[in-house]
Protein backbone atom coordinates (compact mmCIF):
# COMPACT_ATOMS: atom_id res chain seq x y z
CA UNK A 1 0.00 0.00 0.00
CA UNK A 2 1.35 3.49 -0.85
CA UNK A 3 2.08 5.68 2.15
CA UNK A 4 0.28 9.01 2.43
CA UNK A 5 2.35 12.07 3.36
CA UNK A 6 1.55 15.75 3.87
CA UNK A 7 3.33 18.45 1.89
CA UNK A 8 5.57 19.63 4.74
CA UNK A 9 6.86 16.06 5.08
CA UNK A 10 7.68 16.22 1.39
CA UNK A 11 9.72 19.39 1.93
CA UNK A 12 11.51 18.09 5.01
CA UNK A 13 12.17 14.45 4.20
CA UNK A 14 11.46 13.63 0.57
CA UNK A 15 12.84 16.60 -1.31
CA UNK A 16 14.91 14.31 -3.54
CA UNK A 17 11.93 12.24 -4.67
CA UNK A 18 10.45 12.90 -8.12
CA UNK A 19 6.88 14.19 -7.92
CA UNK A 20 4.40 12.94 -10.50
CA UNK A 21 1.24 14.98 -11.03
CA UNK A 22 -1.39 12.80 -12.72
CA UNK A 23 -3.93 15.57 -13.29
CA UNK A 24 -4.86 16.71 -16.79
CA UNK A 25 -2.50 19.03 -18.72
CA UNK A 26 -4.93 21.94 -18.25
CA UNK A 27 -5.01 21.49 -14.49
CA UNK A 28 -1.22 21.25 -14.39
CA UNK A 29 -0.75 24.35 -16.53
CA UNK A 30 -3.02 26.39 -14.26
CA UNK A 31 -0.87 25.57 -11.23
CA UNK A 32 1.30 22.75 -9.88
CA UNK A 33 3.79 21.89 -7.17
CA UNK A 34 7.13 23.38 -8.30
CA UNK A 35 9.32 20.64 -9.72
CA UNK A 36 6.44 18.22 -10.34
CA UNK A 37 6.29 16.38 -13.66
CA UNK A 38 2.97 15.85 -15.40
CA UNK A 39 1.97 12.35 -16.47
CA UNK A 40 -1.75 12.92 -17.08
CA UNK A 41 -4.10 10.01 -16.55
CA UNK A 42 -6.53 11.77 -18.88
CA UNK A 43 -6.16 14.42 -21.55
CA UNK A 44 -8.19 17.60 -21.08
CA UNK A 45 -10.86 16.24 -23.41
CA UNK A 46 -10.93 12.81 -21.73
CA UNK A 47 -11.24 14.38 -18.27
CA UNK A 48 -14.20 16.46 -19.46
CA UNK A 49 -15.81 13.38 -20.98
CA UNK A 50 -15.47 11.36 -17.75
CA UNK A 51 -16.77 14.30 -15.71
CA UNK A 52 -19.83 14.64 -17.92
CA UNK A 53 -20.44 10.90 -17.68
CA UNK A 54 -20.22 11.08 -13.87
CA UNK A 55 -22.84 13.84 -13.73
CA UNK A 56 -25.21 12.28 -16.22
CA UNK A 57 -24.85 8.53 -15.59
CA UNK A 58 -23.26 8.17 -12.16
CA UNK A 59 -20.00 7.08 -10.57
CA UNK A 60 -19.89 3.43 -11.68
CA UNK A 61 -20.42 4.24 -15.36
CA UNK A 62 -17.81 7.01 -15.17
CA UNK A 63 -15.27 4.62 -13.59
CA UNK A 64 -15.82 2.09 -16.39
CA UNK A 65 -15.36 4.82 -18.99
CA UNK A 66 -12.17 5.92 -17.23
CA UNK A 67 -10.82 2.36 -17.27
CA UNK A 68 -11.63 2.07 -20.95
CA UNK A 69 -9.67 5.25 -21.67
CA UNK A 70 -6.71 4.48 -19.41
CA UNK A 71 -6.28 0.76 -20.16
CA UNK A 72 -4.25 1.10 -23.38
CA UNK A 73 -1.94 3.64 -21.71
CA UNK A 74 -0.81 1.58 -18.69
CA UNK A 75 2.51 0.43 -20.17
CA UNK A 76 3.31 3.98 -21.29
CA UNK A 77 2.62 5.27 -17.78
CA UNK A 78 5.03 2.76 -16.24
CA UNK A 79 7.78 3.45 -18.77
CA UNK A 80 7.46 7.20 -18.28
CA UNK A 81 7.51 6.83 -14.48
CA UNK A 82 10.65 4.65 -14.71
CA UNK A 83 12.32 7.33 -16.83
CA UNK A 84 11.46 10.00 -14.26
CA UNK A 85 12.31 7.85 -11.23
CA UNK A 86 14.96 5.27 -12.24
CA UNK A 87 15.51 4.28 -8.58
CA UNK A 88 11.76 3.49 -8.40
CA UNK A 89 10.98 5.84 -5.51
CA UNK A 90 8.33 8.43 -6.26
CA UNK A 91 5.56 10.64 -4.89
CA UNK A 92 2.24 10.86 -6.76
CA UNK A 93 -0.67 13.23 -6.46
CA UNK A 94 -3.89 14.24 -8.18
CA UNK A 95 -6.46 16.92 -7.27
CA UNK A 96 -7.84 15.56 -3.97
CA UNK A 97 -5.58 12.60 -3.31
CA UNK A 98 -8.31 10.23 -4.48
CA UNK A 99 -8.87 7.76 -7.24
CA UNK A 100 -6.47 9.05 -9.87
CA UNK A 101 -3.39 9.11 -7.63
CA UNK A 102 -4.27 5.88 -5.77
CA UNK A 103 -4.82 4.05 -9.06
CA UNK A 104 -1.52 5.30 -10.47
CA UNK A 105 0.27 4.36 -7.24
CA UNK A 106 -1.21 0.84 -7.38
CA UNK A 107 0.00 0.52 -10.99
CA UNK A 108 3.57 1.49 -10.10
CA UNK A 109 3.68 -0.79 -7.06
CA UNK A 110 2.40 -3.65 -9.23
CA UNK A 111 5.15 -2.82 -11.75
CA UNK A 112 7.83 -3.19 -9.07
CA UNK A 113 8.41 0.30 -7.70
CA UNK A 114 10.12 0.13 -4.28
CA UNK A 115 8.56 3.17 -2.59
CA UNK A 116 5.43 4.93 -3.71
CA UNK A 117 3.99 7.84 -1.72
CA UNK A 118 0.79 9.75 -2.34
CA UNK A 119 0.06 13.30 -1.21
CA UNK A 120 -2.66 13.48 1.41
CA UNK A 121 -5.55 15.64 0.15
CA UNK A 122 -3.68 16.06 -3.14
CA UNK A 123 -3.03 19.33 -4.92
CA UNK A 124 -6.08 20.84 -3.23
CA UNK A 125 -4.43 20.23 0.14
CA UNK A 126 -1.20 21.74 -1.15
CA UNK A 127 -3.08 24.87 -2.25
CA UNK A 128 -4.61 25.20 1.23
CA UNK A 129 -1.07 24.96 2.63
CA UNK A 130 0.07 27.67 0.19
CA UNK A 131 -2.65 30.07 1.30
CA UNK A 132 -1.82 29.38 4.96
CA UNK A 133 1.75 30.60 4.38
CA UNK A 134 0.45 34.02 3.39
CA UNK A 135 -1.31 34.35 6.75
CA UNK A 136 1.94 34.12 8.73
CA UNK A 137 4.12 37.05 9.81
CA UNK A 138 7.57 37.47 8.28
CA UNK A 139 10.56 39.60 9.16
CA UNK A 140 10.81 41.47 5.88
CA UNK A 141 13.55 43.96 5.08
CA UNK A 142 12.68 46.04 2.06
CA UNK A 143 15.27 47.14 -0.50
CA UNK A 144 14.00 50.33 -2.14
CA UNK A 145 15.09 53.03 -4.53
CA UNK A 146 14.00 54.81 -7.67
CA UNK A 147 13.86 52.98 -11.00
CA UNK A 148 17.38 52.34 -12.24
CA UNK A 149 18.96 52.17 -8.78
CA UNK A 150 20.13 48.62 -9.46
CA UNK A 151 18.03 47.04 -6.71
CA UNK A 152 17.85 43.60 -8.33
CA UNK A 153 21.61 43.48 -8.86
CA UNK A 154 22.15 44.58 -5.24
CA UNK A 155 19.71 41.93 -4.02
CA UNK A 156 21.60 39.22 -5.92
CA UNK A 157 24.93 40.41 -4.52
CA UNK A 158 23.44 40.31 -1.03
CA UNK A 159 22.32 36.73 -1.61
CA UNK A 160 25.82 35.81 -2.79
CA UNK A 161 27.18 37.38 0.42
CA UNK A 162 24.92 35.20 2.58
CA UNK A 163 21.78 37.30 3.09
CA UNK A 164 18.37 35.61 2.93
CA UNK A 165 16.54 37.04 -0.08
CA UNK A 166 13.53 36.41 -2.28
CA UNK A 167 13.69 37.75 -5.82
CA UNK A 168 10.03 38.57 -6.48
CA UNK A 169 10.73 39.77 -10.01
CA UNK A 170 12.57 36.51 -10.71
CA UNK A 171 9.59 34.48 -9.47
CA UNK A 172 7.21 36.57 -11.60
CA UNK A 173 9.46 36.63 -14.70
CA UNK A 174 8.88 40.38 -14.86
CA UNK A 175 10.77 43.50 -13.78
CA UNK A 176 7.63 45.27 -12.65
CA UNK A 177 7.25 48.17 -15.09
CA UNK A 178 5.86 48.74 -18.58
CA UNK A 179 9.32 47.67 -19.78
CA UNK A 180 9.47 44.78 -17.32
CA UNK A 181 8.47 41.98 -19.66
CA UNK A 182 11.27 42.66 -22.15
CA UNK A 183 13.65 39.74 -22.40
CA UNK A 184 11.64 37.64 -19.95
CA UNK A 185 10.01 34.24 -20.38
CA UNK A 186 6.19 34.15 -20.14
CA UNK A 187 4.87 34.92 -16.68
CA UNK A 188 3.48 32.12 -14.52
CA UNK A 189 -0.22 32.03 -13.73
CA UNK A 190 -1.15 33.82 -10.51
CA UNK A 191 -1.68 30.45 -8.85
CA UNK A 192 1.76 29.22 -9.86
CA UNK A 193 3.38 32.46 -8.70
CA UNK A 194 1.74 31.93 -5.30
CA UNK A 195 2.90 28.31 -5.19
CA UNK A 196 6.55 29.22 -5.72
CA UNK A 197 6.38 32.22 -3.37
CA UNK A 198 4.82 30.18 -0.56
CA UNK A 199 7.61 27.60 -0.67
CA UNK A 200 10.26 30.35 -0.66
CA UNK A 201 8.62 31.96 2.38
CA UNK A 202 8.36 28.64 4.21
CA UNK A 203 12.00 27.74 3.64
CA UNK A 204 13.25 31.17 4.75
CA UNK A 205 10.74 31.96 7.51
CA UNK A 206 13.28 31.69 10.35
CA UNK A 207 15.44 34.55 8.99
CA UNK A 208 15.07 38.22 8.08
CA UNK A 209 14.02 38.14 4.42
CA UNK A 210 15.19 40.83 2.00
CA UNK A 211 12.79 41.64 -0.85
CA UNK A 212 12.57 44.52 -3.31
CA UNK A 213 10.06 47.32 -2.83
CA UNK A 214 7.71 46.03 -5.51
CA UNK A 215 4.28 47.44 -6.21
CA UNK A 216 1.30 45.20 -5.55
CA UNK A 217 1.35 44.04 -9.18
CA UNK A 218 4.43 42.62 -10.90
CA UNK A 219 3.25 42.40 -14.48
CA UNK A 220 0.18 40.17 -14.42
CA UNK A 221 1.10 38.64 -11.05
CA UNK A 222 0.23 40.30 -7.76
CA UNK A 223 1.43 39.94 -4.19
CA UNK A 224 -1.03 38.32 -1.75
CA UNK A 225 -2.75 41.00 0.35
CA UNK A 226 -1.14 40.13 3.69
CA UNK A 227 2.34 39.91 2.16
CA UNK A 228 1.91 43.30 0.50
CA UNK A 229 0.65 44.82 3.77
CA UNK A 230 3.64 43.43 5.67
CA UNK A 231 5.96 44.78 2.98
CA UNK A 232 4.47 48.27 3.34
CA UNK A 233 4.78 48.15 7.14
CA UNK A 234 8.40 46.94 7.16
CA UNK A 235 11.45 49.20 7.25
CA UNK A 236 12.43 50.50 3.82
CA UNK A 237 16.16 50.62 3.08
CA UNK A 238 16.28 53.22 0.31
CA UNK A 239 19.22 53.31 -2.12
CA UNK A 240 19.77 56.97 -3.02
CA UNK A 241 21.43 56.63 -6.42
CA UNK A 242 22.48 59.54 -8.66
CA UNK A 243 20.09 60.09 -11.58
CA UNK A 244 22.88 59.95 -14.19
CA UNK A 245 23.98 56.58 -12.81
CA UNK A 246 20.37 55.40 -12.96
CA UNK A 247 20.09 56.47 -16.59
CA UNK A 248 23.25 54.53 -17.43
CA UNK A 249 21.83 51.45 -15.68
CA UNK A 250 18.55 51.66 -17.61
CA UNK A 251 20.31 52.14 -20.95
CA UNK A 252 22.56 49.18 -20.16
CA UNK A 253 19.60 46.97 -19.20
CA UNK A 254 17.13 47.99 -21.89
CA UNK A 255 19.22 49.43 -24.72
CA UNK A 256 19.70 45.94 -26.15
CA UNK A 257 16.04 45.68 -27.18
CA UNK A 258 14.62 46.81 -30.51
CA UNK A 259 13.13 50.23 -31.09
CA UNK A 260 9.80 48.54 -31.76
CA UNK A 261 9.83 46.82 -28.36
CA UNK A 262 10.78 50.02 -26.56
CA UNK A 263 8.16 52.03 -28.44
CA UNK A 264 5.45 49.58 -27.39
CA UNK A 265 6.55 49.93 -23.77
CA UNK A 266 6.49 53.73 -23.99
CA UNK A 267 2.98 53.57 -25.49
CA UNK A 268 1.80 51.67 -22.41
CA UNK A 269 2.60 54.64 -20.16
CA UNK A 270 1.55 57.37 -22.61
CA UNK A 271 -1.46 58.44 -20.52
CA UNK A 272 0.57 58.44 -17.32
CA UNK A 273 3.52 60.48 -18.54
CA UNK A 274 1.39 62.67 -20.81
CA UNK A 275 1.25 62.80 -24.61
CA UNK A 276 3.98 65.45 -24.88
CA UNK A 277 6.44 63.45 -22.78
CA UNK A 278 5.55 60.27 -24.68
CA UNK A 279 6.11 62.07 -27.99
CA UNK A 280 9.48 63.39 -26.75
CA UNK A 281 10.54 59.91 -25.62
CA UNK A 282 9.59 58.38 -28.98
CA UNK A 283 11.47 61.11 -30.87
CA UNK A 284 14.56 60.51 -28.73
CA UNK A 285 14.20 56.78 -29.38
CA UNK A 286 14.04 57.36 -33.14
CA UNK A 287 17.26 59.41 -32.87
CA UNK A 288 18.96 56.63 -30.84
CA UNK A 289 19.22 58.99 -27.87
CA UNK A 290 18.47 56.39 -25.21
CA UNK A 291 19.73 58.60 -22.38
CA UNK A 292 16.94 61.10 -23.07
CA UNK A 293 14.38 58.29 -23.41
CA UNK A 294 15.34 57.08 -19.95
CA UNK A 295 15.39 60.61 -18.50
CA UNK A 296 11.89 61.34 -19.81
CA UNK A 297 10.44 58.07 -18.50
CA UNK A 298 12.09 58.54 -15.11
CA UNK A 299 10.11 61.74 -14.66
CA UNK A 300 6.98 59.57 -14.46
CA UNK A 301 8.45 56.65 -12.56
CA UNK A 302 10.01 58.86 -9.86
CA UNK A 303 6.69 60.63 -9.25
CA UNK A 304 4.89 57.29 -9.03
CA UNK A 305 7.46 55.92 -6.58
CA UNK A 306 7.26 59.06 -4.42
CA UNK A 307 3.48 58.67 -4.24
CA UNK A 308 3.76 55.13 -2.84
CA UNK A 309 6.74 55.96 -0.64
CA UNK A 310 4.79 58.78 1.02
CA UNK A 311 2.27 56.20 2.23
CA UNK A 312 4.96 54.70 4.44
CA UNK A 313 5.75 55.71 7.98
CA UNK A 314 8.77 57.97 7.47
CA UNK A 315 10.40 56.77 10.68
CA UNK A 316 10.73 53.40 8.92
CA UNK A 317 12.74 54.74 5.99
CA UNK A 318 16.53 54.56 6.02
CA UNK A 319 18.61 56.02 3.20
CA UNK A 320 21.95 54.80 1.89
CA UNK A 321 24.35 56.01 -0.77
CA UNK A 322 25.18 53.49 -3.45
CA UNK A 323 28.75 53.19 -2.20
CA UNK A 324 31.31 50.36 -2.55
CA UNK A 325 30.56 49.12 0.98
CA UNK A 326 26.76 49.16 0.54
CA UNK A 327 26.37 45.37 0.47
CA UNK A 328 28.38 44.97 3.65
CA UNK A 329 26.32 47.68 5.35
CA UNK A 330 23.05 45.99 4.49
CA UNK A 331 23.90 42.39 5.31
CA UNK A 332 25.32 43.32 8.72
CA UNK A 333 22.26 45.23 9.91
CA UNK A 334 21.12 44.01 13.36
Image (cartoon, rainbow, N blue to C red):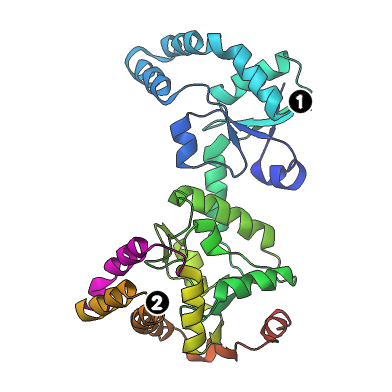
Residue 115 appears left or right of 248:
right
Q: On the image, which quarter does residue 48 sit in?
A: top left
Identify whether 311 is placed above or below 127: below
Dot 2: what SS? helix
Tell me if I can see residue 106 in this picture: no
Residue 65: give x, y in percent of width and height. 44, 10
Q: Which residue is mark 1?
A: 88
Q: Is residue 158 left or right of residue 311?
A: right
Q: According to the image, label 2 marks what residue?
A: 290
Q: Report the span colored magenta.
A: 255-274
Q: Residue furthest left?
A: 275
Q: Compared to 181, does 80 lie above or below? A: above
Decide whether the magenta segment is chiefly helix, strand or loop: helix
- Tell which of 175 and 318 is nearer to you: 175
* Image quarter of residue 4: top right
Question: Which quarter of the rendered picture does the N terminus lie within?
Answer: top right
Q: Is residue 110 above or below residue 224?
A: above
Amino acid sequence: MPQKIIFEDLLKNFCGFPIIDVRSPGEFLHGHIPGAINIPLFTNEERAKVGTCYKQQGKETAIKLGLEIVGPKLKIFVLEAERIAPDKQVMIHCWRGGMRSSSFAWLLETAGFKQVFTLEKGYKGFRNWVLEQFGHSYNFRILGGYTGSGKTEILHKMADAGATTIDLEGLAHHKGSAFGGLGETPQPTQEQFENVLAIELYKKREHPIWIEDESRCIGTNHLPNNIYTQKMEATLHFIDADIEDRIKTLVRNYGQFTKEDLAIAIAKIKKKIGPQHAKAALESLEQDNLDDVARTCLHYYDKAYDFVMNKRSQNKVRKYENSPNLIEQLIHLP
